[in-house]
Image (spheres, rainbow, N blue to C red):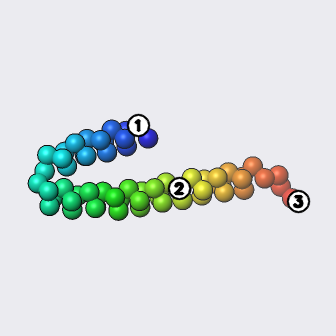
Amino acid sequence: MLDVGRSLAATVAQMQNEPTTWRWAMSTETVIWSILGAFIVVGGLLGLAALWSLIRRPREH
């Protein structure tokens, strides 16, 4: 998570040096990708938790 924060901070710093229109397009795209990334991360964690509970569940035979 720290690497993501560092890269995001570097991206924001780079966007502030760009022209306004380019910065707006980049910020919109960044927001969309960050939302998609959050959904992917949450979905992956939920999937791993479900798999873990299935694996750890005692066999009912």
Q: Residues within 10 Å of mark 2 (few under 14, many from 20)?
A: few
Residue at position x 31%, y 45% in the image: 8
In the picture, measured across the screen, residue 60 lies left or right of residue 51, that is right
- At mark 1, the secondary structure is helix
**Closest to the observer, 3 or 47:** 3
Residue at position x 88%, y 59% in the image: 61
Residue 36: x and y in percent read 41, 61
In the picture, measured across the screen, residue 23 lies left or right of residue 32, that is left
Q: Which residue is mark 3?
A: 61
C-alpha gap between disc 3 and disc 2? 33 Å
Q: Are marks 2 and 1 in contact (CB under 8 Å)?
A: no
| Farthest right residue in view | 61
**Closest to the observer, 53 or 5:** 5
- At mark 2, the secondary structure is helix
Numbered label attached to residue 42: 2
C-alpha gap between disc 1 and disc 3? 45 Å
**Closest to the observer, 1 or 26:** 26
At label 1, the amino acid type is Leu
At label 3, the amino acid type is His
- At mark 3, the secondary structure is loop
In the picture, measured across the screen, residue 44 lies left or right of residue 28, that is right
Q: Which residue is mark 1?
A: 2
> Going from the N terminus, do you reach mark 3 or mark 2 first?
2
> Going from the N terminus, do you reach mark 1 or mark 3 first?
1
| Farthest left residue in view | 19
Q: Is residue 5 above or below residue 24?
A: above
Residue 55: x and y in percent read 72, 52
Residue 33: x and y in percent read 35, 59
Of circles 3 and 2, which is in front? 2
Q: How many marks?
A: 3
